Amino acid sequence: MAKLASLRAEKRLLDRRAADQIRAHILSGVLPAGGRLLETQLSEELEVSRGTVRSALAQLANEGLVQQVAFTRWEVSGASVSDAWEIYTLRGALEGLAARLAATNVTEADGKRLRAVADQLQQAIRKRRFEEAIEIDFDLHTAIVELAQHRRLAEQHRFILQQVRFHMVQSGFFPEDYDELIAAHKALIEAVIAGDADRAEKLARSHNDSEVKQLAKMLKQNASMQKVKGRAS
Amino acid sequence: MAKLASLRAEKRLLDRRAADQIRAHILSGVLPAGGRLLETQLSEELEVSRGTVRSALAQLANEGLVQQVAFTRWEVSGASVSDAWEIYTLRGALEGLAARLAATNVTEADGKRLRAVADQLQQAIRKRRFEEAIEIDFDLHTAIVELAQHRRLAEQHRFILQQVRFHMVQSGFFPEDYDELIAAHKALIEAVIAGDADRAEKLARSHNDSEVKQLAKMLKQNASMQKVKGRAS
DNA sequence: AGTCGCTTGATTGTCAGCAATCAGCAAGAG
DNA sequence: CTCTTGCTGATTGCTGACAATCAAGCGACT
């Protein structure tokens, strides 16, 4: 008997699919941070009832992409400096744990797969296909997280990566030194493959350090400006 | 002007309050892990519509306390060894980050507050009021997380602590050496107060290490048993 | 000019009912 | 006796209508 494709794909609950659409819309950058979302409008565009839209929005709220103001509005989450700082620090902690666990679980086949993805990354950069490279970058980190075999960690990481993506779109904040990026990734996956948990964790955590430091600096500046402003008023 | 209490507390949305009730019910241990939840039954008991209950259950699913089986059932999440291992490893990573950040933010007033809570903990244990002690233990960790001034981290930590609580109730897995517990907490908060980020993080992460190691061991045993069972069948 | 209170339109929150789906069982074919 | 098939009751998924709430604008009063 020829194997038939599962219909599960189509059977996904309506609210999940609605969430997918809205999520894609937000991540595409069409809606600005803080932009308003109307339940009625969404339900008309998606041709589903308001209750379903509501459920979808609740999911996106849990993913950190939208926020609810009770009785008043739904809005796309902010992409402020402090948001970015939170996202990158959390990402470091989660990927640190993931790298540590991955290093203890990794098999030879896994290692091959990781190196293959890293090669894809390098080639995409060489061809100056930077958007594609960023996707592969995410794939690489996701692959390491999967090696950790940690359901909760994988889920949280997915949400964080989504927020990273959103922040990049909103702020136009992209990597600068692609050569260093490649080197950093290679070092990370080699540490994982070698089973060196401590080193893998350290490298995973330091991956965002430059961004975090820059953001923390900007945050401090903002805080002191707030203070001055507060005194003046 | 005397500060008035916010009326926000009463104005909480119905579905949130429904979620609170169900959450409390689950955490009290009345429902066993894997136990089934019926929308109609809950809606009758809470005197709200099924849609509201549904929204509440969706929230609890995001908190990791219940799971949804599409078109079929809602059930209380499992409390298996692998669940526990996931919870404790994640907890370590989150509290490690929190301790690190707390150490850089801490003020003298904060330090006093932390020491006060630690004293409460010690006294509760001396009076052999262990349930109270566990609550204070959670409060202490939550206080450190708050010092990190990290919204997303605080939220995730709240969810994880809930799951820890749930697992303790379900498995009857409680601390053994209370003296060591006190010592570990004191060392942790002193490192935070001293502003020693590295040490604070290390202590926070090692806090659960014994549990994690024990759980990982049990997990390995289970895995090898599965293997044998698989060959036999 | 500024503040208070009201009205109003827009938007979200809640509900009750219908539709879709599933697990289990019973009857019939082989 | 075993396997398949169709039915049935129970449960969840989805919808449209109604209720509660809010922000904004307008006029009256101070």
Image: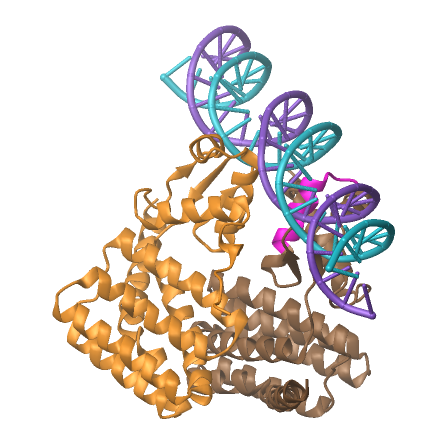
Chain colours: A brown, B orange, C purple, D cyan
Q: Residue furthest left?
A: B127
Q: Nearer the viewer, residue B36 or A182?
A: B36
Position of B111 with respect to A18 (left or right) is left
Callout count? 0
Vertical side of B52 occupied by A34: above or below: below
| Image quadrant in which you'd find residue B185 | bottom left
* Quadrant in the picture for the C terminus of chain B: top left
Residue A204: horizontal and vertical position, in percent? 53, 82
Q: Residue at x 66, y 73 (%)?
A: A164
Residue A105: horizontal and vertical position, in percent? 44, 72
Q: Nearer the viewer, residue B148 or B1?
A: B1
Q: Residue at x 39, y 59 (%)?
A: B162
Position of A156 with respect to B87 (left or right) is right
Vertical side of B184 occupied by B199: above or below: below
Asked whether A54 falls inside the magenta stretch, the response is yes
The majority secondary structure of the magenta stretch comes to helix
Q: Which residues are magenta?
A: A47-59
Q: Residue at x 57, y 77 (%)?
A: A86
Residue B145: horizontal and vertical position, in percent? 43, 75
Asked whether B186 falls inside the magenta stretch, the response is no
Position of A209 with respect to A15 (left or right) is left
